[in-house]
Image (cartoon, rainbow, N blue to C red):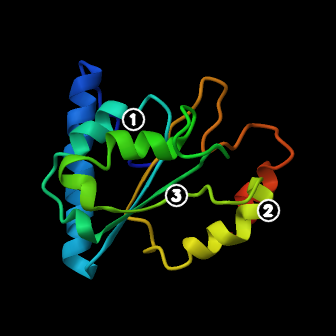
């Protein structure tokens, strides 16, 4: 058992989303105030949509916040399955429109071929990450890391 675990219960998803938006905004602004920039790593999918929309209205120095994805489907950014599209349409709006977004998908045909370019694009991304928002699929995957997949060991051990 993990020591000092805190369990918080919310009456509705809206209560949870509002609390998370406030907490994330505070963490991002604290990082900007402390070191002049902040980093936010997010998952896509449908679960964080309302959270993204609430967060986009928060008073944060968004021009000093660097945003990227925890994972991405290797599809063009305008396709319905693109996590980048989700972030652009639901988070990078309103006050958050000035955030510095870096996507993962690039011009290469496959993620394997584009890996070096993506790694280079993120090489100077502010670290350690200030906020990381991960989701979990109904099959137990997170960050496109699927339980028992052949690639899982590499995903958990590579520095890239």
Q: Between residues 6 and 148, which one lies in front from this camera angle?
A: 148
Q: Closer to the observer: label 1 or label 2?
A: 2
Q: Residue furthest left?
A: 59
Q: Residue furthest top?
A: 11
Task: Indicate the position of residue 92 as horizontal and vertical percent values.
Answer: 31, 50
- The residue drawn where x is 44% and y is 39% is 86
Q: Which residue is denoted by mark 1 in the rendering?
A: 48
- Give the SS element for disc 3: loop
Q: Quadrant of residue 104?
A: bottom right
Residue 33 lies left or right of residue 132; in this view the side is: left
User: In terms of sequence position, does the residue under pointer 3 or pointer 1 come before the other?
Assistant: 1
Task: Indicate the position of residue 101 as horizontal and vertical percent values.
Answer: 41, 61
Q: Which residue is denoted by mark 2 in the rendering?
A: 113
Give the CA separation, mark 3 to mark 2: 16 Å
Q: Few, some or many C-alpha atoms within 10 Å of disc 2 (few <14, some 14-19, many ≥20)? A: few
Q: Few, some or many C-alpha atoms within 10 Å of disc 3 (few <14, some 14-19, many ≥20)? A: some
- The residue drawn where x is 20% and y is 57% is 26
The image shows residue 131, relative to residue 89, as above or below, that is below
Does residue 5 show up?
Answer: no
Does residue 52 show up?
Answer: yes
Q: Which mark is residue 103?
A: 3
User: In terms of sequence position, does the residue under pointer 3 or pointer 2 come before the other?
Assistant: 3
Q: Few, some or many C-alpha atoms within 10 Å of disc 1 (few <14, some 14-19, many ≥20)? A: many
């Amino acid at each position: 058992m993990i020591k000092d675990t805190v369990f918080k219960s919310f009456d509705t998803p809206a209560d949870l989303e509002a609390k998370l938006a406030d907490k994330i905004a505070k963490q991002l602004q604290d990082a900007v105030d402390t070191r002049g920039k902040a980093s936010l790593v997010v998952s896509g999918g449908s679960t964080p949509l309302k959270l993204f929309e609430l967060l986009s209205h928060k008073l944060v120095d968004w021009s000093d916040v660097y945003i990227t994805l925890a994972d991405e489907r290797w599809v063009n950014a305008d396709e319905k399955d693109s996590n980048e599209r989700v972030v652009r349409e639901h988070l990078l709006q309103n006050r958050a429109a000035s955030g510095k977004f870096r996507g993962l998908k690039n011009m290469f045909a496959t993620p394997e071929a584009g890996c070096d370019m993506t790694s280079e694009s993120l090489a100077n991304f502010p670290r350690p990450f200030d906020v990381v928002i991960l989701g979990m699929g109904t099959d137990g995957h997170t960050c496109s890391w699927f339980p028992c997949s052949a690639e899982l060991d590499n995903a958990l051990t590579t520095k890239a």
